[in-house]
Each structure stands twice: as structure tokens, then as C-alpha cells.
Image (spheres, grey):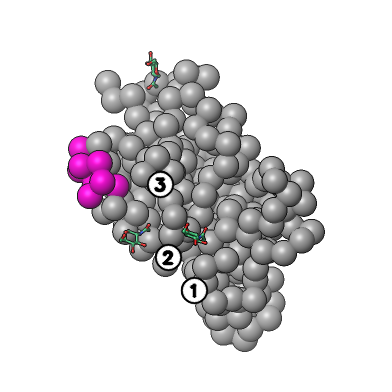
Amino acid sequence: MSLTSLFVVQILLQSTIIVTSTCGSPTSAATVSNFTSILIFGDSTVDTGNNNFIDTVFKANHLPYGQDFPGHIPTGRFSNGKLIPDFVASVLGIKQTVPPSLDPNLSNDDLRTGVSFASAGSGYDEITTVVTGAIPVPKQLEHFKSYRANLSRIFGSNEAQNIIEKSLVIISAGTNDFGFNYYLLPTRKQQYNVGGFQDFLLKALQDLVQVTSKAFKPPITNFNSLPRL
Ligand SMILES: *[C@@H]1O[C@H](CO)[C@@H](O)[C@H](O)[C@H]1NC(C)=O
Ligand SMILES: *[C@@H]1O[C@H](CO)[C@@H](O)[C@H](O)[C@H]1NC(C)=O
Ligand SMILES: *[C@@H]1O[C@H](CO)[C@@H](O)[C@H](O)[C@H]1NC(C)=O
């Protein structure tokens, strides 16, 4: 029996759900503690500093951001301290903080234990980032593919696959798709009513999970547990 399990934590419009796929075995403390890596996609709720490395006005590289972070330094997190991915990584015993994937100084161990691809001001819809200049979630997926290729180069393809399979995946986005896009720009509002746009975003999320799950085994199949917004 494959011992692989994959969690997707999805925080969309303040609703938090956890999708688990455990290949026949019930979720347990033992399952959770077997994650050896953490991979993050989404917006400012989970961006651990990527926006420091791109051209956007959405940067948290100044105080009071980071005033309660270890060392009291602004890291690019939109928080006075750590973010949820940092707490999750530390609770699971993976590491104390999750670095941004765009940091040019990441060690091999940083890469092995996972990174955040998230970008503050982003969303599932590429149009959302027209206003913010952030990295849209589909582009974050391209960065993930580059990360995976780098893992293979560094650790060999078998070990790279092993690292990916033992990763916890967190996806957190959606609010900016409304705040910076639907309610601000004409394009989507002309195409969709609110319910229609919600469906559009859920479809984008499904596409994301489908593509990422090809890298993971087994693929996530229990999408029925996603609530309607
Ligand atoms: C987690 O690791 C423990 C110890 O290596 C092992 O006994 C257990 O079967 C693993 N569980 C899963 C779901 O991989
Ligand atoms: C990366 O390391 C170099 C050399 O130590 C340093 O000058 C640079 O500031 C570091 N960059 C970041 C983003 O930490
Ligand atoms: C993969 O490695 C290349 C070459 O070192 C680097 O330019 C690129 O940013 C890396 N990609 C990721 C997602 O870390």
C-alpha cells in the first residue's frame, strides 16, 4: 500500500477546508508527522517573502511588518510575525519557517524541506494581478515545475519524486480575485455574476490541483468535499 498522503489546505474567501487523500489509510497523527516537506501556493496570507524579489508595490519589507518575527526583521511576510505555513511547518517538525522560492540564497536543505511560491496580491485569475503586479497562481505553478526540475538536478529524479510525494501542499487564495478584480475591473463583471465568477475560480483551483497532483501520487479525487461559496 502506498503510504503517500497529500493534504491541500484551501482558504478561499475566508472559508477554510482541508482536502485529504490518504490512499486507503485513515488520517492519523502518524500520517501527518510523515510529511518531510511543505509547498505553498497563493496570496499574501501565505507569501513568505517572494514579493521582495519582484516588481510590485505590494511589499512587506518594512516595519511594522516583522516586528515580532525572530530577529524583529521585516521578511516580506504580511504579518507582524510568522504566517500559517511557518506554524504548520514547525508543528509538523519540518522546519521553523518556510522560505520564499525566489530567494536566490536557498540551500539544498531549504529546497528539500519545501518553499512558498505564493505572492501577495495574487489570485487564481491572471487578471487579478494586472492591478497588483503579483505572480498569479498559474505562474506559481510554472515556478513549481522549475523547482521540481532543480530538485531532480540536485538530488536525482527518484529522490526528487520522493520529496514531492511526501510534501504537504497548502493553497490559499481567492479574496484578491474579488477585491482587486471583480469589484474593481469591468472584464469579469461583464462576463459573470457573482456565482458564475465563484465557479470560474473553483474551476481554476481544480485545474491547479489537477496539474499539481500529477506530480503527486495518488492524485486527489475527492473534490466533492469542496463547498460551494
Ligand atoms: C509514518 O512513518 C512511520 C514511521 O516510519 C510508519 O510506521 C508509518 O507507517 C508511516 N505512515 C504513513 C502514512 O506513511
Ligand atoms: C544572498 O547572499 C549574498 C552573499 O552572501 C548577499 O550579498 C545577498 O544579500 C543575499 N541575498 C538575499 C536576498 O538574502
Ligand atoms: C532553478 O534553478 C535555476 C538555476 O539555478 C534558477 O535560476 C531558478 O530560479 C530555480 N528555480 C526555482 C523555482 O527555484
Find disc 2 in the rendering and name its residue: 138
- Residue 195, label in figure: none
Task: Tell which quarter ligand 1 is in.
Answer: top left
Asked if disc 3 is less than 8 Å from ligand 2, the answer is no
SS under mark 3: loop
Say whether disc 2 or disc 1 marks the residue closer to the N-terminus: 1
Find disc 1 in the rendering and name its residue: 126
Q: Amino acid at mark 3?
A: Ser
63 lies left or right of 19: right
Q: In x, y percent, where is residue 34?
A: 43, 25
Q: In x, y percent, where is residue 72?
A: 73, 49
Tell me the residue at 27%/21% (across/down).
Answer: 1
Asked if disc 1 is less than 8 Å from ligand 3, the answer is no
Residue interval drawn in magenta = 151-158
- Residue 107, label in figure: 3
Residue 114 falls within the magenta-colored stretch: no
83 lies left or right of 166: right
Q: Are marks 2 and 1 in contact (CB under 8 Å)?
A: yes
